[in-house]
Amino acid sequence: MYKYDAIDRALVDERVEEFRDQVSRRLSGELSEDQFKPLRLMNGVYLQLHAYMLRVAIPYGVLSAKQLRALADIARRYDRGYGHFTTRQNIQFNWPSLIDIPEILERLADVEMHAIQTSGNCIRNTTMDPFAGAAADEVEDPRPWCELIRQWSTLHPEFTYLPRKFKIAVTGAPSDRAAIRAHDIGLRVVRNDEGETGFEVFAGGGLGRTPRIGVKLTDFVDGRDLLAYLTSILRVYNLAGRRDNLYKARIKILVESMGADAFRDEVEATFAQLRGGVHLTPREEIDRIRSFFPPPLAPANDVAEGSAPSRPGFNRWLLRNVAAHKVNGLASAIISLKPIGGSPGDATADQMDAVAALAEKYAGGEIRVTKEQNLVLPHVPRGYLPKLYDALFDIGLATPNAGEATDIVSCPGLDYCNLANARSIPVAQAISHRLSADGLSDQAGDLTIKISGCINACGHHHIADIGLLGVDKRGEEHYQLTLGGSGTEDAAIGQIVGPGLSGENVPEAVARVVAAYLELRISASEKFSQTLRRTGSEPFKEAVYAH
Amino acid sequence: MMVITANRLNDGRVVYRAESGAWTRALEEAQRFADEVAACSALKSAEADAGAAVGPYLIETDEGAPSGKKIVRETIRLSGPSAGTTKLSVQDANHV
Ligand code: SF4
């Protein structure tokens, strides 16, 4: 993992002291809320329904065991004993007091973490394939590139006041596990004929009010020119993006209004000017950053063969929650934070501590956070999997449902969020119960359900097989159902099925859609999106409203 | 009836404005307004008193409980998240 240098440390420490002073001036009345609000938001502090919420950046979703322990400690000491992992691979604490936040930030700084750029119209935390450095299909580990982007984008003076927030996603593999085309910029690591590392670049994707799939800008940008190319995109956006209308301020609107070709021409023209010079990342610098991310080693012989698990359900977990690794003898284990009927993405302080200990014991001390709101231990010797499973089982983290219909992604919704129209978590809980009760989730296999409590789409509902959007219909919670979205290589925005449903009708409607899929699919290997494309939406629409 | 609510400055907790002008955690201690003009004028003084609570606004109540179009939101603000607990039993959680 990357280690802070003196510059990183000074920057984060200074920010803690600055915010401590701002909080104390707010509490003394010297600063009004209008003056303080932009300052707190620059430090990830929101005011939600019940309390302040602190959003902490987890750089490209990578955590050390020590960092996870620090998060557990914060959850226990300053919150209500849990934290919420988000679709942006960050963590949110729902209950901190404002007076405690400077101290929390100090504790975070001690473990090289912060909440800078987790809000505001700036470049946010980079989304990354959670199997980076481990995935069997990977071209190259994208972590060093994400770190390069982190350093470049942190407090970047030119891009601190963009027209709107800005999100970059990176995948190192042909399979897209970072939803690169649903981000403002999406990067896929590729190699050219000479074997040099570069990036296929997409821009103009995004969810929210006007969901769009990103368009390709180029097939190849040399890795050394990555920052010049990113700067070019951001500069065009920063100058031409709309600042007069909040709803039209994202880059997706600019790309659409200019047209992809014209936007690309502008970017290329800027790139031609910027390329080289200070924007060039020398090979030595790339190698220096790479040195923080050594490739995982094959396990020693004595852990090649493991003991038998003593808790029930191991084989099913192996099937659902263990992913192939590029190194023989290793595997990546997905720790589902979606117990049936639980709150998606929540982990208690005790669970976080336990996962940290397991990561150290069995997986080289590294943990990843996924945009599906789960955790991953990327490098586990296969021989340790039974022991790991037993230990996860004992702390309630062995739900064997990764990627299944009960692995529901859900934003906090109206239970916590000030912007929400409707609740998300209880709907997720009810669907989870319903789909597990008669085995629908097991039978369906890979199937994504995602729920957002408002049009801001933090629950990524547009890119789910089955998406649910909470709307306020004259004071009542209703849910709009979309089908056929995808955040992977075949990225697509889900289509609205028809009139919204009241909350209590949602679980049955979703169950009928899943049952219809099981009936309509040609074989177990035909994915939901394939069935939907083949049959059209009509049979699914009938299923939704068949009551 | 209308009531003034806000979030407490130091910890963000939900508070209601009592007749004395103090902020209270208990909705039943809040001052109730039948008259919109009186409610708006009290809201103005609540806004002026920004030292203790953030973002005051009016909510509708009926027999001491939130009502009207924002009933779900205000009930959740009053009673806490409606979502199930994260502390399921291990057996429930693993679902095997
Ligand atoms: S989608 Fe809406 S309700 Fe959900 S967390 Fe985002 S802003 Fe809040």
Image (cartoon, coloured by chain):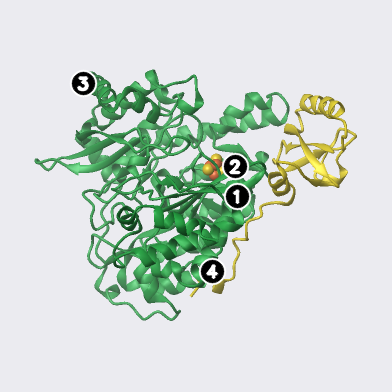
Label 1: which secondary element: loop
Q: CA distance from mark 2 to mark 4?
A: 27 Å
Label 2: which secondary element: loop
Kind of residue sitting beneath label 3: Ala
Q: Quadrant of residue A40?
A: top right
Circles 1 and 2, Cβ within 8 Å, touching? The answer is: yes
Whether residue A31 is visible, yes or no, is yes
Q: In the figure, A317 relative to A418: above or below?
A: below
**Residue that carries the numbered disc 1 in the rendered image:** A423
Q: Which chain is yellow?
A: B
**Residue that carries the numbered disc 4 in the rendered image:** B93
Q: CA distance from mark 3 to mark 1?
A: 48 Å
**Residue that carries the numbered disc 3 in the rendered image:** A272
Nearest to viewer (mark 3 / mark 1): 1
**Residue that carries the numbered disc 2 in the rendered image:** A420
Q: In the figure, B19 relative to A108: above or below?
A: above
Label 3: which secondary element: helix
What chain does mark 3 sit on?
A
